[in-house]
Amino acid sequence: MARDEPGRDPEAWDLVVVGAGPAGAAAALGALAAEPGLRVLLLDRADFPRDKCCGDGIAPHVLDVLRTVGAGHVVDGWTPLEQLELSREDRSVTGRMARPVWVVPREVFDARLVEAAVAAGAVLRRHRVRTLAAHAGGTLVDDHLLARVLVGADGAHSVVRTHLGEPNAGRRALALRGYAPTPDSRRGRQVIRYGDRRQPSYAWAFDRGDGLSNVGYGEFVDDHAGPDDEGVTRAILLEQLERLLPGSTEGGTQWRAHHLPLSGWRWDQPDGAVLLAGDAAGLINPMTGEGIYYAVATGVLAGRTAARVLAADEPEQAGRAHRAAVRSLLGRHLHHTWLASRLTRRPEVVDAGIGAAGRSRHAFDALVELGLGDGRITPRLAAGLATELVRGTRPTSSTRPTTRTPRR
Ligand SMILES: Cc1cc2nc3c(=O)[nH]c(=O)nc-3n(C[C@H](O)[C@H](O)[C@H](O)COP(=O)(O)OP(=O)(O)OC[C@H]3O[C@@H](n4cnc5c(N)ncnc54)[C@H](O)[C@@H]3O)c2cc1C
């Protein structure tokens, strides 16, 4: 990767993408798939391959998007996972997902995506972006790079989002992950166990298929907590992980924690030639903490939009067009995940979800779509949840023992 040297005259680019994670690489791929001759500069403060604190869960929807820009190969050689186990206290459901997921370390996944973007024609440069300023020809980056259109894909603590006045700033979670040997009991599955602290809170163990699992725990961060609040510390996160999934921290290495900017009811994108994608756009599923699908989906949309407005010589129309495209794809889904995340603050609703998923294949699949992709709370899922809530919050002899497999 070339290192950036500040020069005197601004260096002009059609598209500058800040951040080369999944959202940024996808933006470059989206733009170059639409217009291969575009001059695209991909900036990242890190060299690749680099680690990123994540659960490494790659939903099938991610690959659906990446295939459209010729990058569906990024999980090749890794083992697909089919089994999902959801549990809280003494209730649980285990089922086969309609489509498999992958667990690929981000050190591998992100580097492959960046390689694909460079192979498509993007120029990758190591550079930490610090300042952005409006300029007659577009946006001036750190006084020496000029972007006709700029995509902010610089993650949870985005400088581009700050430049735009912090749109979509909302609730956050904090999560910690590590890698630990996979015990036989958790081989071949994604395990999620809900906690009882600030909701949403859960521990996970995702088998990578190579003898190691990505294990972690995360919970909602209360930005308005009082002075007596102990906050969320690394020690608490580790303690909760071990409490919910005993033995999961044994032999664990590479422990890292990071914030998750959770999506809200409404998603916004200001007008103009600066676009947001992925975590920088405040797009992480508030039910599950999944953000890679949103990152690649909004990244590709941003790249395609950039190519289109540049071809029409109307870069200022980029923001309006991107807002419409993202809302069209995710708008209603975000309403449903917002609602679901509010409802699941109550443990009886989590129990009802587990119960409904155990009784009906439709409910199980609908919950997976809502949590991993762009699904909705379908009428049948809502009816299943209501039935479970009416059955009561306390386990009865008919709802216990609670390890169920979804029925047709
Ligand atoms: C513990 C944890 C577990 C998670 N588990 C999952 C999961 O299993 N599945 C899932 O789908 N999602 C998961 N997520 C969410 C997922 O990690 C994010 O949604 C995803 O990484 C968003 O991609 P992105 O490209 O928007 O941002 P990032 O992946 O954060 O990439 C941003 C890039 O921008 C660069 N950058 C930042 N600032 C600058 C700057 N000023 N100048 C230049 N470059 C900059 C960074 O170096 C980085 O490469 C998890 C998150 C956490 C914290």
Image (tube, rainbow, N blue to C red):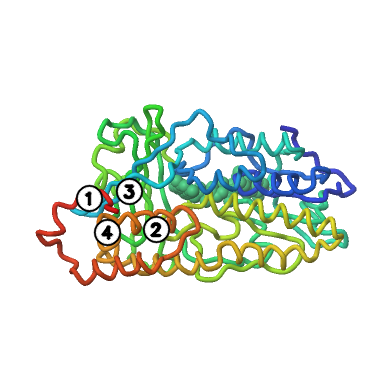
Of labels 2 and 3, earlier in sequence is 3
> 10 Å neighbourhood of mark 4: few (<14), some, or many (≥20)?
some
Q: Secondary structure at mark 2?
A: helix
Q: As drawn, is 309 to the left or to the right of 279?
A: right
Q: Are marks 1 and 2 in contact (CB under 8 Å)?
A: no
Residue that label 1 marks: 404
* Mark 3 → mark 1, Cα distance in angstroms: 15 Å
Quarter location, residue 39: top right
* Mark 1 → mark 2, Cα distance in angstroms: 17 Å
- Asked if disc 1 is less than 8 Å from ligand 1, the answer is no
Q: Check disc 1 and give the amino acid type.
A: Arg
Residue that label 3 marks: 192
Residue 2 lies, with reference to residue 380, above or below; the image says above
Of labels 4 and 2, earlier in sequence is 4
Residue that label 2 marks: 366
- Say the numbered circle drawn on residue 307: none
* Mark 1 → mark 4, Cα distance in angstroms: 22 Å
Q: Check disc 4 and give the amino acid type.
A: Asp
Q: Residue 107 location, x and y as percent?
A: 54, 35
Q: As drawn, is 108 to the left or to the right of 117?
A: left
Residue that label 4 marks: 196
- Asked if disc 4 is less than 8 Å from ligand 1, the answer is no
Q: Are marks 3 and 1 in contact (CB under 8 Å)?
A: no
Q: How many marks?
A: 4
Front residue (pair 408, 74): 408
The residue that appears at 41% across and 34% down in the rendered structure is 208
Front residue (pair 330, 109): 330
Q: Secondary structure at mark 1?
A: strand
